[in-house]
Image (cartoon, helix red, strand yellow):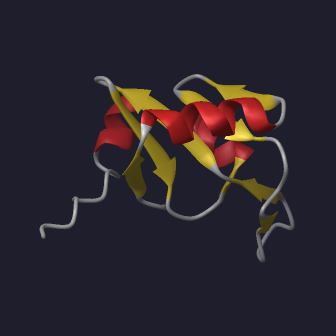
C-alpha cells in the first residue's frame, strides 16, 4: 500500500478544484487517472486526505477500490515520516 506525504493546504485545495473529484469516505481522488494497475488494468489516481488540520497526498497512485477500502485507522499507519533537516 502506498504511503501518504504531507502537503500544504493550498496544494490540497488546488487539487480538489482542478477536476471534478472522486469522493471516498476518508478523502478524494483527482479524477484523471495517473496510470493503470499492471495486475488488474484498473485506473489509478492520486488520493488526498485531510486529518487533524493536516493535508496528505498519496505518494503513489491508488485504485478507487483500494482507496474506498481504506479507513482512517489504516490511513494513519501510512503517513510517511517528515524529513528532518
Left or right of 60, for residue 53:
left
Quadrant hosting residue 22: top right
Residue 34 pos. (x, y %): 78, 62
Residue appearing at x 13%, y 67% in the figure: 84
Q: Residue lying furthest front in this view?
A: 10
Residue 31 makes an appearance in the image:
yes
Q: Residue furthest bottom?
A: 38
Q: In the image shown, does 32 or 39 lie closer to the viewer?
A: 32
With 66 as the anchor, is 56 left or right in this view?
Answer: left
Q: Nearer the viewer, residue 84 or 70?
A: 84
Direction left: furthest residue:
85
- Relative image position of residue 9 (x, y in whole percent): 45, 33
Question: 21 or 64, which is in the foreground?
Answer: 21
Say above or below: 35 vs 49. Answer: below
Residue 80 place in picture, x, y as percent: 30, 58
In the rendered image, is residue 70 in sight? Answer: no
Which residue is drawn at the image coordinates 60% and 42% (left, top)?
67
Relative image position of residue 41 (x, y in whole percent): 87, 67
In the visual, does 9 lie left or right of 31?
left
Answer above or below: position of 37 versus 71. below
Q: On the image, which quarter does residue 35 sit in? A: bottom right
Q: Quadrant of the C terminus?
A: bottom left
Asked if residue 84 lies left or right of residue 62, the reply is left
Q: What's the residue at 60%, 45% (across, down)?
A: 47
Instruction: Determine the residue positioned at 39% across, 54% down.
Output: 5
**Labels in figure, total:** 0
Amino acid at each position: 500500500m502506498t504511503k501518504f506525504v504531507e502537503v500544504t493546504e493550498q496544494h490540497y485545495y488546488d487539487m480538489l478544484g482542478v477536476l471534478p473529484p472522486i469522493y471516498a469516505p476518508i478523502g478524494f481522488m483527482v479524477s484523471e487517472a495517473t496510470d493503470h494497475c499492471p495486475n488488474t488494468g484498473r485506473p489509478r489516481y492520486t488520493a488526498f486526505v485531510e486529518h487533524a488540520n493536516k493535508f496528505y497526498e498519496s505518494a503513489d497512485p491508488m485504485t478507487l477500490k483500494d482507496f474506498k477500502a481504506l479507513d482512517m485507522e489504516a490511513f494513519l499507519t501510512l503517513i510517511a515520516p517528515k524529513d528532518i533537516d
